[in-house]
């Protein structure tokens, strides 16, 4: 099966969202720990998967978002949701 993919950076550049909601089945580290420009984004809600992502990778995501002035506000452990707001 071939599935077409789109780069998050291309979508963000095109649509300039202010709020991202992501459930990307373990790819959160790949998307958010790099050089993704989130300058238009004020809020991010991520569902992370601790059975796929190590605590270190989850911390990398938190640090990468903090570097873009998006800070962890709420964690829902039972659903592994992380909510960030621009600070």
Image (cartoon, rainbow, N blue to C red):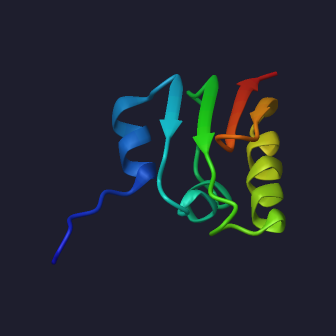
Residue visible at 50% across and 42% down? 22
Find residue 37 and report its horizontal and vertical position in percent.
58, 44
Question: Does 10 sit above or below residue 46?
Answer: below
Residue visible at 45% across and 27% down? 17
Question: Does 84 sit above or below residue 26?
Answer: above
Q: What is the residue that sits farthest to the left in this orientation?
A: 1
Residue visible at 58% across and 57% down? 28
Residue 73's image quarter?
Answer: top right
Residue 54's image quarter?
Answer: bottom right
Find residue 31 and report its horizontal and vertical position in percent.
55, 58
Image side of residue 56 versus residue 34, left or right? right
Q: Is residue 38 visible?
A: no
Give the quadrant of the N terminus.
bottom left
Number of marks in the image? 0
Residue visible at 70% across and 30% down? 83
Find residue 87 and report its horizontal and vertical position in percent.
82, 21
Find residue 3 and report its horizontal and vertical position in percent.
20, 68
Observer-nearest residue: 53 or 69? 53
């Amino acid at each position: 099966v071939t599935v077409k993919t789109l780069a998050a950076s291309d979508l963000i550049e095109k649509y300039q969202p202010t709020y991202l909601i992501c459930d990307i089945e373990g790819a959160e580290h790949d998307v958010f720990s790099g050089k993704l420009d989130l300058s238009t984004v004020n809020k991010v809600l991520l569902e992370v998967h601790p059975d796929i992502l190590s605590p270190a990778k989850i911390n990398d995501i938190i640090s990468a978002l903090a570097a873009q002035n998006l800070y962890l506000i709420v964690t829902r452990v039972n659903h592994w949701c992380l909510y960030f707001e621009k600070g």
